[in-house]
Amino acid sequence: MSGVARGTVNAAGRLVAADPALATLHARAGGNADTPLAVVPLASIARLARRLGVVVSRPVTVADEEADVELWVRAQPVGDEVRLAVSGWRAQQPWPGPRGDDPVELEGWRWECDAALRLTHLALGAAARSGSEVSDLLGQPVTALFTLEADDAGGLPLIDALAQRVALRGQRARVRSGGKPVILEARVRRDAAGSFAGFVGTARAVDEAPPPAPPLSEAFTQGLDRALRRPLARIVANADSIHGQADGPIAPDYADYAADIAGAGRHLLSLIDDLADLQAIERADFNVPAEPIDLADLARRAAGLLSVRADNAGVTVLRPPLGATASAQGDFRRVLQILVNLVGNAIRYAPQGSAVAIELGETEGRRTVTVIDGGKGIAAEDAERVFEKFERVDPAEPGGSGLGLYIARRLARAMGGDLTLVSAPGRGARFTLALPAG
Amino acid sequence: MRALLDHLLTGMVGEIEERLREDASRMLVSRGDRAGAAQLRQGGQSAAERLERAGLLANEALLAELFARLRQDLIAERLPVRAEDDEPSLLPRLAQVGDPAVAAAARGLLVAESRRREALAMGDVTASDLPAELHQQLVWRVAAALRNGDTSADRALVEAAGRILATYDEGERADAQAMRLAFAIDARPQELPALLDEAIGDRRLSLVFAALALSAQVPFEVVRSLAVEPDDERWWLLLRAVDLDPLTMARLALALASADPRRGDQDLPTLLDAANAVSAEEARAELAVLRLPPDFRAAVDALGSGEAA
């Protein structure tokens, strides 16, 4: 989901030319060739750029079917027209998720650097207490302050984070002048056009041998669920009503903050759902109610939910034709959850310009739906590993927490079916969900 | 805003109090007065509480200074950053240039701004960063609040306060460092737009104010007070008075609008059109009074209100 979608807005505010991703967004917001640009935040940026005569760059959040999508918009006035360049196209994840540029937990004393890794800010007092004469180091490279240490795999997280423009986690280092060990963490700072502009980080003092973190216990998960669900629901509801300006008009910025808060709350709720899922499916007595479902309909729904994401990735999803049906036994919501996971993965790994196919079939009294991508594929020895908890084929790949396929297979089996993978390196992956025929 | 201001002021008073108690009690120990030292080190209520109850924690000048400074810091914190393909940002680049005056001033500003931001964000106040007069007043007030009626303690407090004042360098304040850097860069009129553009893109609002102050020949505090208010039309006059081109004005205004929730950007085009209709000469004439020394202006204002009463 990368790349830049470009478009041109004419003097009348109409979107006269647009790449597919931008055209889809316009159409989804109710626009067509004869209407002004229907995506309101984009239209107002274009109008401002035209009236001021200067480039306007800023992030905006637009609603998409599946999630809010954060876009970086650059509007450049050229004569009477405004050229739009829209990048980003990533779903908002306010919780520290697997994506690199989410906020990381910052604890310890602060440091910041620019895109060339020059120190631009230091908590002088705290840094000095950690044994470093630091004021001369401002403006110098980060490595003048810290000696970086390789992780267990021999890599330097800072270099990886810099190369991938993602958050820095767990870089072991020593403060050069005092030799004290610290752990560096940082989030990415982006400029108004969405480009990498440096890190905002912290240095946390550590003991020489930090104790291992305790595992997440079941009681903890249950407590988290109970303690968080209701307050979060209240936060979401209140933030939504502030955003909707239910009690009268407020400044647009505050309305936007409220929408951010609601979005973050919803994300947390979905994470609690995942944890609850995980805990539920690991119980011996776990079962899922079976009802007659139409696998073809569910596959079309899953593809529909992810269509904007697919457009943006330049991937075509070939969904089952409208007339096709495939009746099976299963739980509607759980099967949709599995299919969204499979199609989402396929879009993530499919090369730009390729197609993801969804095929229906039948084998040994079971209905099947197979999701096929043209990605780099998975080696035979890894094919079982991807279904294990917290396992991923390529940990360097952005996206994915390592739980999705594990949960999906457990759900499929609980419905009397299975989820299997056939793949070879360089030949894409074929995930097949099989369920009892209905 | 009010809470931040209280937080900052309490932090400043706390820092001065800690140093006064420490220094003065050490002096008492060196004179053999261990009991007096112990009493001064721990005794009594906090200076901030005592001053607040007496209504002396802050006077108008101190509040005005802190309010303007907080507004500046909050806006600067939210300014959109602009990055150029892994190039070092403005201050690290200037800190490495061949001109020693520019490099030293750039390093000085990096240090001063780091100190100020930590004070605001973490409450880690290591210096008041106040103009000398206000700093002096605050130190004496804190010293007065620590009195416990003992004359030898008084003498120790006076000596400790004197030492704090003697080591305070007004020139190390972030505003002063920004002015020093602006002086060292000494941007020609044709270079000013590029400097302002780079400084705002690097979120160095203090350097923007300093460059404008130098170019318009008005004090830093005046530029700051015009810029941090969302609707002071003299801000636009100031930009015109230095003959800034419409595009640079638009970029500055856009950056401020995106960093300051009190400003909207949809009426910017109208405001800019109105500002651009004013010639540089007219703008300079309108702002002439701002160029007068602040004390003189204060005296003129006082005289005016005295005669009106």
Image (cartoon, grey):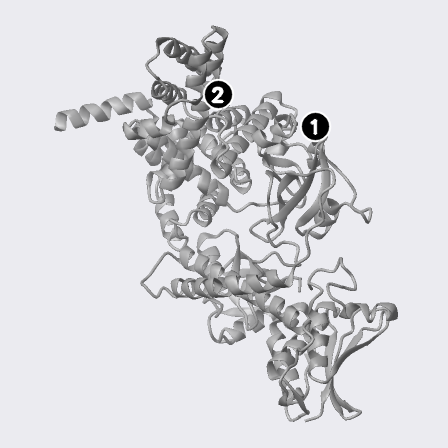
Q: Amino acid at mark 2?
A: Gly
Residue B290 is left or right of residue B36, and the answer is: left
Which chain is mark 2 on? B
Q: Position of residue B132 (x, y in %)?
A: 41, 20
Query: Is A333 on the left or on the right of B140, as rendered?
Result: right
Write down the residue under mark 1: A178
Give the SS element for disc 2. Answer: helix
The residue positioned farthest toward the front in the image shown: B35
Residue A219, compared with residue B274, is above or below; it is below
Q: Nearer the viewer, residue A108 or B24?
A: B24
Residue A259 in picture, x, y percent from top left: 46, 62
Seen from this angle, which residue lies furthest top? B31
Whether residue A4 is visible to the viewer of this picture, yes or no, is yes
Q: Residue at x 74, y 49 (%)?
A: A160
User: Label 2: which residue?
Assistant: B171
Q: Left or right: where does residue B215 sit relative to residue A360?
A: left
**Chain letter belonging to callout 1:** A
Disc 2 packing (10 Å; few <14; some 14–19; many ≥20): some
Estimate the x, y position of residue A26 in percent, counting from the top left.
Answer: 53, 71
Q: Is residue B107 above or below residue A53?
A: above
The N terminus of chain A lies in which quarter of the figure?
bottom right
Q: Is residue A204 left or right of residue A154?
A: left
Q: Nearer the viewer, residue B35 or A114?
A: B35
Which image quarter holds the C terminus of chain A? bottom right
Q: Nearer the viewer, mark 2 or mark 1?
A: 1
Q: CA distance from mark 2 to mark 1?
A: 30 Å
The secondary element bearing badge 1 is classed as: loop
Q: In the rendering, at what x and y percent does residue A193 appear?
A: 58, 53
Residue A432 at least partly seen:
no
